[in-house]
Image (cartoon, rainbow, N blue to C red):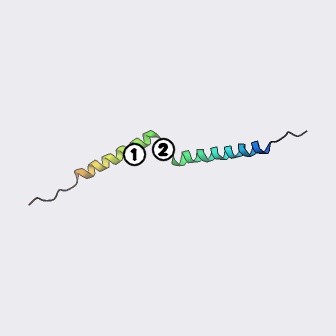
Amino acid sequence: MADLLNFNRARKRKARATAERQAAENRIRFGRTPAEKQREEDAQALAERQLQQHRREPDDR
């Protein structure tokens, strides 16, 4: 005798699996660790400081 299959449960199980697979792909594609975010922020701050140091002031003649 065949096993009974509840179509509602099967549909929801399939939807959950699809959503989890999509979430995993998004974490890989868009996710950054806190360390990566901090490193990028530090690099941006350093670049801004270096730019400010090389800025020329207008002559006050």
| Helix, strand or loop for disc 2 | loop
For the point 69% across and 46% down, the residue is 15
Structural crowding at the residue carrying mark 2, measured as other residues with C-alpha within 10 Å and reported as few (<14), some (14–19) or many (≥20): few
| Helix, strand or loop for disc 1 | helix
Question: Residue 47: percent from the left, percent from the top?
Answer: 31, 49
Which numbered circle lies on residue 32?
2
Extreme residue in the front direction: 8
Of 22 and 51, nearer the camera is 22
Residues at marks 2 and 1 touching, judged by CB atoms closer than 8 Å: yes
Structural crowding at the residue carrying mark 1, measured as other residues with C-alpha within 10 Å and reported as few (<14), some (14–19) or many (≥20): few
Question: Residue 49: percent from the left, percent from the top?
Answer: 27, 48
Residue corresponding to mark 1: 40
Label 2, label 1: how far apart the Cα atoms are: 10 Å
For the point 88% across and 40% down, the residue is 2
Which quarter of the rendering shows the N terminus? top right
Question: Residue 31: percent from the left, percent from the top?
Answer: 51, 45
